[in-house]
Image (tube, coloured by chain):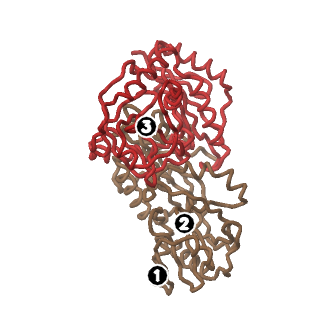
Chain colours: A brown, B red
Amino acid sequence: MDPKYVFVNNTFLAEDKASLLVSDLAIQRGYGIFDFFKTINGKPIFLEDHLKRFYNSIAKMHMEIKQSPDELKDILQDLQQVNDIPDSGIKMIVTGGYSEDGYTQPAKQNLIITQTPFIAPTTFSANGISLATYHYQRPLSEMKTIDYSMAIWLQPWLKEQKADDVLYQHGNVVRECPRANFFIVTKNHEVITAKNNVLHGVIRKNILGLRGAGFKITERDFIMEELQNASEAFITSTTKHILPVKMIDQVPLPGDGAVTQLLADLLLQKVKAQY
Amino acid sequence: MDPKYVFVNNTFLAEDKASLLVSDLAIQRGYGIFDFFKTINGKPIFLEDHLKRFYNSIAKMHMEIKQSPDELKDILQDLQQVNDIPDSGIKMIVTGGYSEDGYTQPAKQNLIITQTPFIAPTTFSANGISLATYHYQRPLSEMKTIDYSMAIWLQPWLKEQKADDVLYQHGNVVRECPRANFFIVTKNHEVITAKNNVLHGVIRKNILGLRGAGFKITERDFIMEELQNASEAFITSTTKHILPVKMIDQVPLPGDGAVTQLLADLLLQKVKAQY
């Protein structure tokens, strides 16, 4: 395959040349934000939602980039053209940038945009995943920061638990997975997802948007006991759409997954309307 | 001034050429650790303590570097020779490195060593600083990670508080500053510093080592009320040694700073014995 191109600040570079000086605040202090969307048949999916959240993360982290959303869209189109990967994931990162003393803001932020081949799921996979709960609250949880220290650090622990992913809880309140939102379905078919101190995912938003379609979907904090009494559970993310959860802390969920499957089908229709 | 050199993996590079590919896990996921020590008159201060903590952070974060401590010491000497900055700060960073998918370990870690001019304080500054408390617990707090997202993010807030630095508290328990340990001196001249969920600083360790010198110094968790009743307070760090704190959340500390000054003088003797 031809080398992929990466956009860095104002230019397209071959990926083996796309670098940042080590003085960048991402390397010095783990400071940065990103967003990630997919393209299917060359069409960006839910792009407006991702751009809105991207600029929101930048502003709330006291950073800035010189490109307006429209200018950024032009760059994204150019990147797709030079790379020619119709089915892809596109990641936009803004790093803390070059600071005088490696700590103090203001710094000159760096913008990086990468594109990698990625095939989005176009059908629902009924094969569920297993989650292991862990006590942790993501800091600055409403911005999509690059801070995944805990998730990376937990990887060996996850293997020990024989689980596919972590589910964070904080003071008995259920939050989210490191890269996905989490939903339960109660025995009364109510669908619930955490409201506070979680990242507001784009797929999550689309699921909440199905409230009109005959589902009772509630955005509120809920505790471990409610999770333990749930019938079904699933996670949502840009790369996974909806994935059913079959097991929490090695305890199987009792439901047949029917509500999860209905929501997944409706979500896939929304995604298909985008390409 | 001549350009400074930076050591990256196995070679010395001019600082404007010292870079990492954007696929490094530090940039993608904020994953990395570091340590920082100073040199005075070309002599590294408390080097063994810093190296011990450095390798401990690497191992506990499930990372590795190929250099042994002795090989690393040779590299540090070479770096000092090429740069010729007798009074300096030397920072060793190990980043998460290049991972197949930008998330999953194992990855190939990167080692970066930078040196910058820095004059360590050689006398005690009685001018105190002011701190503003903030509810936060540093994750993975016993490793010296690059995760300073909260500290960088709080900078505009700190300005609003007219404070020099943040003091983290968690559930009413006093912890540490982002880059310094924190001590109080009670009205009975007992010196106390937090024991758990803080970074164990090298200067902190040296202060605890003064227990034999007629001071009652205790390592235990303490709560905000004890801080509010304290007579003196100070912070410790490699760059600051001991700095008295004159104000917490805009309330002055009542003491005359005599115990802080005694400890600072004894610490300076320990530092001077190193060069």
| Residue A251 position within the rendered picture, expressed as x and y whole percent measured from the top left | 70, 71
| Residue B168 position within the rendered picture, expressed as x and y whole percent measured from the top left | 42, 46
Q: Quadrant of residue A142?
A: bottom left
Q: Secondary structure at mark 1?
A: helix
Say if B216 sits above or below A215 in the image: above
Q: Which residue is mark 3?
A: B183
User: Is residue B163 shown to the viewer in this render?
Assistant: yes
Label 1, label 3: how many angstroms apart (C-alpha)? 53 Å
Disc 2 packing (10 Å; few <14; some 14–19; many ≥20):
few
Q: Amino acid at mark 3?
A: Phe
> Which of the pair A121/B217 is nearer the observer?
B217
Say if A9 sits above or below A51 in the image: above
Q: Quadrant of residue A135?
A: bottom right
Residue at 41 percent across and 64 percent down: it is A48
User: Residue A246 vs residue B25: left or right?
Assistant: right
Q: Which residue is mark 1?
A: A211
Disc 3 packing (10 Å; few <14; some 14–19; many ≥20):
many
Tell me which label, 1 or 2, sits earlier in the chain.
2
Q: Which residue is mark 2?
A: A172
Say if B203 sits above or below B23 in the image: above
Q: Nearer the viewer, mark 1 or mark 2?
A: 2
Q: Amino acid at mark 1?
A: Arg
Q: Nearer the viewer, mark 1 or mark 3?
A: 3
| Subunit that carries the residue with mark 3 | B
> Which of the pair A31/A168 is nearer the observer?
A168
